[in-house]
Image: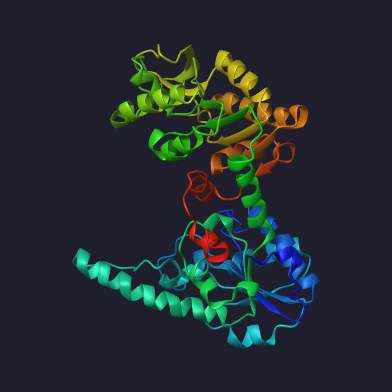
Amino acid sequence: MQLIDNFNFAGKKAIVRVDFNVPLNKETGEVSDDTRIRGALPTIKKIIADGGSAILMSHMGRPKQNPDPKFSLKQIISAIEKNLGQSIQFCDDCMKADEQAAALKPGEVLLLENLRFYEEEEGKPRGEFASDEEKKAAKNALKEKQKDFAKKLASYADVYVNDAFGTAHRAHGSTAVIADYFDEPNKMFGFLINNELKAMDKVLNEAQKPFTAIMGGAKVSDKIMIIENLLDRVDNLIIGGGMTYTFIKAQGGQIGNSLCEEDKLDLALEVLKKAEAKGVKVFLPTDAVNADKFDKDANTNTSKTNETPEGWMGLDIADETIKTFSDVISNSKTVLWNGPMGVFEFDKFAKGTSAVAQAVAKATQENGAFTLIGGGDSVAAINKNKLADKVSYVSTGGGAMLEYMEGKVLPGIKAIRGK
């Protein structure tokens, strides 16, 4: 497999799949968080420093028509230029960039308009269908058109670089299909994807003990596959967030109005049984901050998680649990964190998630632990507490990271490295 570090882009045009699906300020239209743009800079700068030119392609949002000004990448040009330190060119139709791509000089950068303006990118037909058969036929026809779409994008360049980890789990035209039109020496991952894969492979295959996985979030069903894949690897499994109460109720606890997946109670007990059989210590919250309604200004009280008062719901972990979780994390040598401990977007219920973020940072800085943070909410929590530079790695791809950690093959990764 070709490595970007060893490749010389001099005199070559590189088409680079980046993930510039960045949030925009609703009032000003400006980029409100440029993390993803900054993440792609090392790859773009390597290409132009070598004397090559870069053609950037990305999606933004989920447009239903072509074009859709609301999702135009024109809106992020100034943010890219500011971060890159140079002006860039723009093509307002990703399928009509032949002349601009051909005219690119070494050191120049061209941004293509939103790939998802074309349904061929995702390979999902738009519109209404009279029957499942009609929809299936439309999807099959679109798969053929997707190949032409990818071939057209490939025709603009000599080299393909995939640096969009956030979309690597999708078999899209620009992430998987396009790779077929480049031979092995001329397709590679960018620095961002390489770093993502190194971090995840280190956790999955080279974790130092004790290894602690922190799984938060609302639903057991969302995390069951990653939990099951990790049970063969971890020493400790910390469970928090809304899914806590499915486990608590499964064990006979009183959970009031707390979130619970009634159809997953047996599954929760099965997870606990498997963990015990494999010698994995499971840590569930023992106390919680409860609310009388799901609201930032709700009234609160504290109780044992298995004694939640009627009419109340658990929205954060409380002090006893914070201490337990923090102690486990502090004594770990490898930590994977995915999902918050509560409704941390409400300040009243952010203490537990912030405490876990601080414990993860402390384990990194004081205990030399390797710590990997992934998933939108966990990343937001780390950033909210200004601790991103105090942990080992913050993943840019929530869904892609989850699927990789579950042991699934990601189409965008397989297209280049073959597995």
| Total labels drawn | 0
Residue 184 point in image, percent of width and height: 61, 72
Say if 417 sits above or below 250 in the image.
below
Q: Residue at x 43, y 66 (%)?
A: 122
Q: Which quadrant of the rendered structure holds the N terminus?
A: bottom right
Q: Nearer the viewer, residue 337 or 74?
A: 337
Say if 166 sits above or below 378 in the image.
below
Say if 345 sits above or below 11 in the image.
above
Q: Quadrant of residue 416?
A: bottom right
Q: Is residue 277 visible?
A: yes
Residue 219 point in image, percent of width and height: 41, 34
In the image: residue 16, left or right of residue 117: right
Q: Quadrant of residue 366?
A: top right
Say if 97 sits above or below 267 in the image.
below
Q: Quadrant of residue 27?
A: bottom right
Residue 286 point in image, percent of width and height: 49, 15
Q: Is residue 293 visible?
A: no
Q: Residue at x 72, y 61 (%)?
A: 41
Q: Residue at x 48, y 60 (%)?
A: 411
